[in-house]
Amino acid sequence: MADRTVVKYLNDILDSITQVESYFTTFPRRFDVYCETPMMQRAIQMNISIIGEATNKLLKIAPEIPITKARKIVDTRNYMIHGYDSVSHDMVWSIVINHLPLLKEEVVRILTEIGTKPGHDK
């Protein structure tokens, strides 16, 4: 499973999560700040979309990949892209607070198990 493409997509997911986390070094990690900061909203939504697209590509080449709710991640990406006008702040914030930390743990674990240092796709 240590296919280079698999590693690339896993690192794309990890990079997007790291990007989202980095926003909270500039802004307080608070829901009200997220709601009042359109730039942060768009940036986080874009990173969630990238995570969903990378997960979709992973599922096509490595359907056995042990990512919890992988299909739901892809569905969320599709909803954010195609239903962008009805994405709620509550939904996005829930993903940031409740789901990205677990996903990060899983991706780091998978990369470690396949013998690749997280963040390195070579």
Image (tube, rainbow, N blue to C red):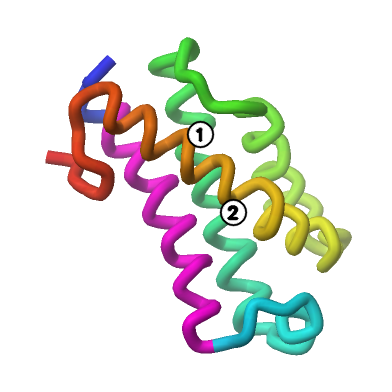
**Lower position in the chain sequence, tag 1 or tag 2:** 2
In the rendered image, the vertical position of residue 11 relative to residue 29, given as above or below: above
In the rendered image, the vertical position of residue 7 relative to residue 46, given as above or below: above
Question: What residue do we see at 69% from left, 58% from top?
Answer: 97
Left or right, residue 31 beside residue 65: right
Q: Secondary structure at mark 1?
A: helix
Q: Main secondary structure of the magenta part?
A: helix
Asked if labels 2 and 1 touch by Cβ distance under 8 angstroms, the answer is no
Pointer 1 residue:
55
Question: What residue do we see at 78% from left, 76% from top?
Answer: 31
Question: What residue do we see at 54% from left, 41% from top?
Answer: 103
Left or right, residue 117 beside residue 77: left
Number of marks in the image?
A: 2
Inspect the image, locate mark 1, and give the three-letter code of the amino acid beneath it: Thr
The quadrant in which the C terminus is found is: top left
Q: Which residues are magenta?
A: 6-26
Q: Residues within 10 Å of mark 2 (few under 14, many from 20)?
A: many
In the rendered image, the vertical position of residue 25 relative to residue 78, given as above or below: below
Left or right, residue 58 beside residue 94: left
- Frontmost residue, 58 versus 112: 112
Left or right, residue 30 beside residue 44: right
In the image as oriented, which residue stretches furthest toward the top?
64
Question: What residue do we see at 72% from left, 79% from top?
Answer: 30
Q: Which mark is residue 48?
A: 2
In the image as oriented, which residue stretches furthest toward the left?
122
Q: Which mark is residue 116?
A: none
**Residue 15: x percent and y percent?**
38, 55
Q: Residues within 10 Å of mark 1 (few under 14, many from 20)?
A: many
Inspect the image, locate mark 2, and give the three-letter code of the amino acid beneath it: Ile
